[in-house]
Image (tube, grey):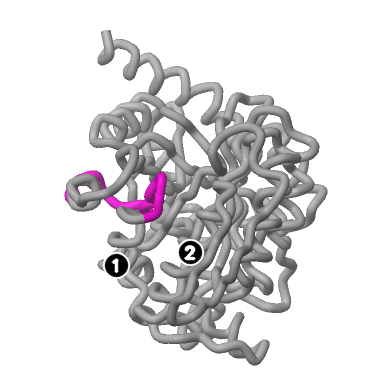
């Protein structure tokens, strides 16, 4: 059972206009947040990749890969997971960047491949934004090349999208065979890609009854190597009592309604074929990537019980969002992590 935090690369995760968390997507804030997360015992941080803010391009946006390299140099134990949209980087260039950050981190770096949903980020830069399934076909070739280069192979590849001749990267990874590869997305092409090339599948926050069949579907698929691991994104609101937690949830939900004009303006930029956005449209929630749909809202014991239930279903890593982030990250570390790990130890015994 591992716990991670989303870096605040585009500021607030739940509501942009919150007096308890003024908007801040700066490097200084993210550096302090990740260093504190590491000191609190969190196992990982996810640095999402956007070149411009996906909700309001007048707002600040941290760059993922330069930040991941910097975090690798100043941290000691936390896993640094950098998201990557294959359409933005040639696989040879990205693999070289990843191998260097892996060395800087001394074996703590990972890639999170996502095939993108924000058309504006590509089209406004004059870059193509192919159909959903074509992006996955491109991503499949891309990750195969990156994976082999990171493993130190000399690569020859002739596919639909890429031609690579006799390419090898040095130095090779001195810490392990290659960095870990996380894959997101819940469509059929995404699940097939995870089974073929992923180490861990990132699932967006959903109720446990919806998560269980997703895990079973990917776990049963043939693959070479170790079984797929599973990670869950979730927004947490935990308080001493259930009533206090739901009051905090209602507060954030109310604040989030102020962002509705931004969401409406952004809707034309969202690929309607992206399963994450189809799922998120089903009911109100706080947070991104499923947010509070994972139902980690309640008393300390209720949230710990639900985390343990997800863990028993197969979730190994919980990638968490909070608001106000730093204060709630501390609360979770002090109140929930010990409870959840105690439940896991008792079950194992």
Mark 2: few/some/many CA within 10 Å (<14, 14-19, 20+): many
> What is the residue that sits farthest to the top in this orientation?
349
Which residue occupies 39% across, 43% down?
Answer: 231
Residue 216 located left or right of residue 51? left
Residue 244 located left or right of residue 20? left
In primary-sequence order, the first of circles 1 and 2 is: 2
Q: Which residue is mark 1?
A: 187
Q: Is residue 309 visible?
A: yes
Which image quadrant: the C terminus? top left
> What is the residue that sits farthest to the front in this orientation?
166
Q: Which residue is mark 2?
A: 114
Which residue occupies 56% across, 78% down?
Answer: 262
- Of residues 112 and 341, the one nearer the viewer is 112
> x%, y% of residue 1?
41, 27
- Of residues 97 and 3, the one nearer the viewer is 97
Which residue occupies 55% across, 26% down?
Answer: 333
């Amino acid at each position: 059972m591992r716990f991670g935090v989303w870096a605040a690369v585009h500021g607030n995760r739940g509501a942009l206009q919150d007096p308890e968390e003024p908007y801040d997507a700066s490097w200084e804030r993210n550096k302090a947040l990740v260093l504190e997360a590491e000191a609190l015992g969190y196992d990982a941080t996810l640095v999402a990749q956007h070149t411009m803010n996906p909700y309001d391009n007048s707002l600040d946006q941290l760059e993922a890969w330069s930040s991941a390299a910097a975090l690798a140099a100043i941290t000691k134990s936390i896993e640094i997971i950098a998201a990557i949209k294959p359409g933005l980087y040639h696989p040879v260039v990205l693999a070289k960047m990843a191998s260097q950050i892996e060395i800087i981190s001394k074996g703590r770096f990972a890639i999170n491949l996502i095939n993108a949903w924000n058309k504006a980020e590509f089209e406004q830069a004059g870059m193509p934004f192919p159909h959903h399934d074509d992006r996955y076909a491109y991503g499949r070739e891309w990750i195969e090349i990156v994976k082999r280069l990171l493993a130190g192979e000399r690569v020859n590849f002739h596919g639909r999208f890429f031609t690579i001749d006799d390419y090898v990267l040095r130095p090779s990874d001195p810490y392990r065979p290659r960095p870990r590869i996380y894959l997101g997305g819940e469509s059929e092409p995404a699940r097939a890609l995870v089974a073929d090339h992923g180490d861990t599948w990132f699932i967006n926050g959903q109720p446990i009854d919806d998560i269980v069949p997703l895990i079973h579907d990917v776990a049963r698929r043939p693959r070479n190597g170790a079984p797929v691991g599973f990670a869950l994104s979730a927004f947490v609101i935990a308080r001493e009592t259930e009533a206090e937690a739901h009051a905090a949830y209602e507060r954030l939900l109310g604040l989030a309604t102020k962002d509705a004009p931004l969401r409406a303006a952004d809707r034309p930029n969202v690929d309607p074929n992206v399963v994450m956005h189809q799922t998120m449209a089903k009911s109100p929630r706080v947070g991104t990537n499923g947010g509070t749909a994972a139902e980690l809202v309640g008393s300390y014991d209720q949230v710990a019980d639900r985390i343990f239930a997800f863990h028993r279903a197969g979730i190994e890593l919980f990638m968490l969002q909070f608001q106000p982030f730093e204060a709630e990250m501390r609360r979770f570390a002090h109140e929930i992590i010990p409870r959840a790990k105690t439940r896991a130890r008792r079950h194992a015994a």
